Amino acid sequence: RALQHYQHHLGIARELRDVQSEARALGNLGNFHCSRGEFAQAVPFYEQYLKLAPDLQDMEGEGKVCHNLGYAHYCLGSFRDAVKYYEQDLALAKDLHDKLSQAKAYCNLGLAFKALGDFAKAEECQKYLLSLAQSLDNAQARFRALGNLGDIAVCKKDMAAAVQFYEQQLALALQVGI
């Protein structure tokens, strides 16, 4: 029923040539499919949204769609495409001076680089995440960054560094009750 509603919304928006409503409907259709784990079906809706983005002048909305596209591609195992969209998300977050969105983008970008086996870039992204998390006083993001850095150290077979990151993560969890 929700799918029919979103498709109907899209049809009406296109008939009226209402670009804002069309973009909203495309985003909703992409989100609907993502929420059901239908990532391949979500991708075309998000891509159509991005084609409309220059007319929307909504950098925040564009960043969210780039994030969602990165996530969909990550879940599909298309890690290079995930990197592409996470990098766009990061660039938009920087343009908006939105540190929390930058932190999320760095986290996701680092995970995509890790999946590609580019541990140096993955580590760099997670260190940026950690720095932003500290400046934002965001314990959840610090916790995530420390765990991700530990995971990357394991991939690099640097167990001493992994243990240090995991110990810092545990200490943080005990300190703030995560």
Image: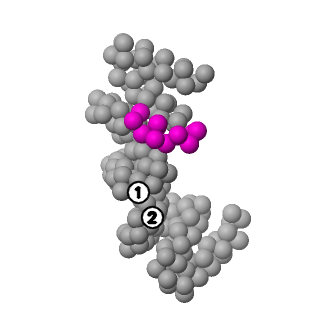
Look at the image and tell me in which quarter the C terminus lies. bottom right
* Other residues around mark 2 within 10 Å, as few (<14) / some (14–19) / many (≥20): some
Amino acid at dot 1: Phe
Q: Main secondary structure of the magenta part?
A: helix
Q: Amino acid at mark 2?
A: Ala
- Looking at the rendered structure, the secondary structure element under dot 1 is helix
Q: To which quarter of the image does residue 171 belong? A: bottom right
Query: Which of marks 2 and 1 precedes in the sequence?
Result: 1
The reply to whether residue 152 is in sight is yes
**Residue at which label 1 appears:** 79
Residue stretch rendered in magenta on the structure? 34-45
> Residue 119: image x %, image y %?
41, 72
Kindly identify the residue that appears in the image at 38 percent across and 70 percent down: 118
Q: Please indicate whether residue 152 sits to the left or right of residue 96 in the image.
A: right
Q: Decide which of 138, 115 is in the foreground and name it.
A: 115
Q: Position of residue 45 (x, y in %)?
A: 41, 33
| Viewer-proximal residue among 129 and 108 | 108
Residue ID at (56%, 42%): 37
Which element type, helix, strand or loop, lies under badge 2?
A: helix
Residue 8 lies, with reference to residue 26, above or below; the image says above
- For disc 2, the marked residue is 115
Circle 1/circle 2 CB separation < 8 Å? yes
Asked if one can make out residue 124 in the rendered structure from this viewpoint, the answer is no
Q: Picture coordinates of residue 46 (x, y %)?
A: 40, 37
Identify which residue is drawn at 57% across, 39% down: 35
Judge whether residue 141 is colored magenta.
Answer: no
